Amino acid sequence: MRLRLIRSRRVGPATYLRLLSEHGSAAAALRALPEVAKAAGVKGYEPCPEPVVLAELRAAARVGARMICLGDPDYPAMLADTSDAPPILWSMGRASLLSKPCVAIVGTRNASGLGARMARKLAADLGEAGFTIVSGLARGIDALAHKASLPAGTIAVLAGGVDVVYPAENAALAAEIAETGLRLSEQPLGLQPQARHFPRRNRIVSGLAQGVVVVEAAARSGSLITARLAGEQGREVMAVPGHPMDSRASGANILLRDGATLIRSADDVLEALGLPAPVRDTAPARAPDPTRASEAAHTAPPPPDAPLEGRILAALGPTPLAEDQLTRDMRAPARDMAQALAVLEMSGRITRSAGGMVQLAGD
């Protein structure tokens, strides 16, 4: 009945709670809905048909998704305290992660090499400290944070149905999260995400967490929406500073200008939250990612079919980066790297300096 109520037309979280409060149960609220709608000027209103809900339940059973309702003992307490908490959550994976303290890490889809390494380092260190890392499974910073925190446990909040992976390039990562972490969504099974769903998703990301860390974000981005929602929810808003001339860091720098806590490491996050490191989860999880022992794995593998010169430009920013580190990040033969760097330098798109450093050319 509760699922049918929230799936009824024009019933959002606030209306759902008001109807339950006024009528005492979901069944009574469903019976009253046509009259409530009529009083609001909506004629011929009908609640969500029962076959629609039954189809959703069957779809959930097929993929092993579990429904968690607001008020259930295992509904996340932090999220329940928000003003528009989702009445229904679909979960796939380790629901026990919802009872652990969480930190959200979000950021740009077009991460620089330095930003990518920072995201992975923060996620891994906070995971080892006992925190569950929450993010939105987007490409870039989100995906890097999820992958780095897989050994400790990570929560991916999806904008579409919990069984719909977007973007498709993160399908393998999403499958790993469903096995050792948790996928979460308030949307019906099978729903393809649309633009309007992402801000709704973002409020869950921030609502689950004690604080949100922004690692590289443009001045207008979904990450800043998440940060704004976090502030409205009373969460700690934190940001990693970036070079003033790098547009990928402009949003994070704006947050810092407006009072966000500056983050240089996981220790800064712990200090900002004012909490001791929590007890680590002893539940079995996947073996630690062996690639974390290598500097070559600090960034996500770039698409193998992308032109090398374009991949180099995407990884660089105004901050100098060691050429040998860039070569490891690109996972390209040294000869190919030398040729690509020479072309980019000759064209004036990058500059190289003493000590084997390279950066994007200034204006």
Image: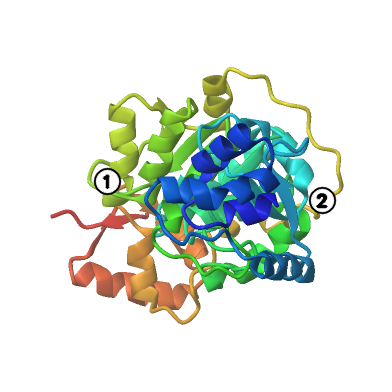
Task: Depth check: give the residue in front, 179 or 186.
Answer: 186
Task: Depth check: give the residue in front, 238 or 11.
Answer: 11
Q: Residue at x 60, y 68 (%)?
A: 164
Q: For residue 346, say whether it is visible.
A: yes
* Quarter of image, res 237: top left
**Residue 280 vs residue 185: left or right?**
right
**Residue 25 vs residue 43: left or right?**
right
State the quadrant of the C terminus: bottom left
Q: Are marks 2 and 1 in contact (CB under 8 Å)?
A: no
Q: Which mark is residue 285?
A: 2
Amino acid at pointer 1:
Ala
Secondary structure of the residue carrying numbered label 1: loop
Q: Residue at x 37, y 66 (%)?
A: 312
Q: Which mark is residue 129?
A: none
Q: CA distance from mark 2 to mark 1?
A: 37 Å
Q: Is residue 189 above or below residue 111?
A: below
Location of residue 90 in the rendering, given as x and y in whole percent from the top left corner: 68, 55
Location of residue 216 in the rendering, given as x and y in whole percent from the top left corner: 38, 46
How many numbered circles does the render carry?
A: 2
Q: Residue at x 78, y 33 (%)?
A: 280
Amino acid at pointer 2:
Ala
Secondary structure of the residue carrying numbered label 2: loop
Q: Which mark is residue 219?
A: 1
Q: Is residue 356 above or below residue 281?
A: below
